Image (cartoon, helix red, strand yellow):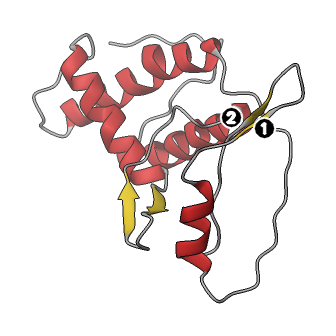
């Protein structure tokens, strides 16, 4: 294990708010070890524009490609878009490992919710590159217009 990450906030009065289980998780994960603590400003979450592009362009392109491979999928079907979303998260995002107070490791599934703008952009780039190499499709860049036959 390389490290743990916690999100917190310093409010307007200067009071620090961090997860209540943080100390227990650190103790369980690093018992008997030297540690280093770094605090930095959290990067902005990904944008509505990025999220819109992902759901309106990237995922439908994958649905079309999987349909061409013989899967019975339709780009306008929300269930099929969600299926592609789950596929992409599991393929391109690492899940998080957390520790209980007793030191038991638990794996959380991957999520796009915590990706900042840069990481979400990389996520989309990774999907597009994989799709070009393995599905032989080009996912259009944001703002690029294409015709789908």
Q: Nearer the viewer, mark 1 or mark 2?
A: 1
Report crowding for label 2: few under 14, some 14 to 19, many 20 or more residues within 10 A (C-alpha).
some
Residue 36 in the image: above or below residue 97: below
Q: Name the one closer to the observer, 31 or 41.
A: 31
SS under mark 1: loop
Horizontal and vertical percent for residue 133?
A: 46, 52
Horizontal and vertical percent for residue 7?
A: 67, 42
Q: How many marks?
A: 2
Q: Quadrant of the N terminus?
A: bottom right
**Residue carrying label 2:** 116
**Residue carrying label 1:** 42
SS under mark 2: loop
| Residue 124 horizontal side relative to residue 96, left or right | right
Identify the disc placed on residue 108: none
**Residue at 84% of width from left, 59% of height from top?**
38
Horizontal and vertical percent for residue 85?
A: 35, 33
Q: Name the one closer to the observer, 128 or 138.
A: 128
Report crowding for label 1: few under 14, some 14 to 19, many 20 or more residues within 10 A (C-alpha).
few
Q: From this viewpoint, is residue 133 visible?
A: no
Residue 58 in the image: above or below residue 19: above
Q: From this viewpoint, is residue 77 visible?
A: yes
| Residue 99 horizontal side relative to residue 109, left or right | right
Disc 1 to disc 2, how far (Cα)?
9 Å
- Sequence-wise, the earlier of marks 1 and 2 is 1
Residue 122: quadrant of the picture: top right
Residue 61: quadrant of the picture: top left
**Residue at 29% of width from left, 23% of height from top?**
81
| Residue 47 horizontal side relative to residue 137, left or right | right
Marks 1/2 in contact by CB < 8 Å: the verdict is yes
Q: Quadrant of the C terminus?
A: top left
**Residue at 61% of width from left, 79% of height from top?**
30
Q: Name the one closer to the observer, 137 or 37.
A: 37
């Amino acid at each position: 294990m390389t490290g743990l990450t916690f999100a917190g906030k310093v409010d307007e009065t200067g009071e620090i708010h961090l997860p209540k289980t943080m100390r227990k998780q650190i103790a369980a994960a690093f018992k008997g070890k030297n540690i280093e603590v770094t605090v930095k400003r959290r990067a902005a979450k990904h944008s509505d524009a990025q999220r819109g592009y992902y759901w309106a362009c990237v995922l439908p392109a994958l649905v079309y490609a999987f349909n061409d491979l013989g899967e019975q999928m339709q780009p306008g079907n929300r269930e099929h878009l969600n299926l592609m979303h789950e596929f992409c998260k599991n393929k391109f995002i690492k899940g998080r490992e957390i520790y209980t107070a007793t030191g038991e490791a638990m794996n959380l599934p991957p999520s796009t919710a915590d990706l900042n703008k840069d990481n979400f952009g990389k996520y989309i780039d990774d999907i597009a590159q994989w799709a070009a190499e393995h599905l032989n499709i080009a996912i259009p860049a944001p703002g690029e217009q294409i015709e789908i036959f």
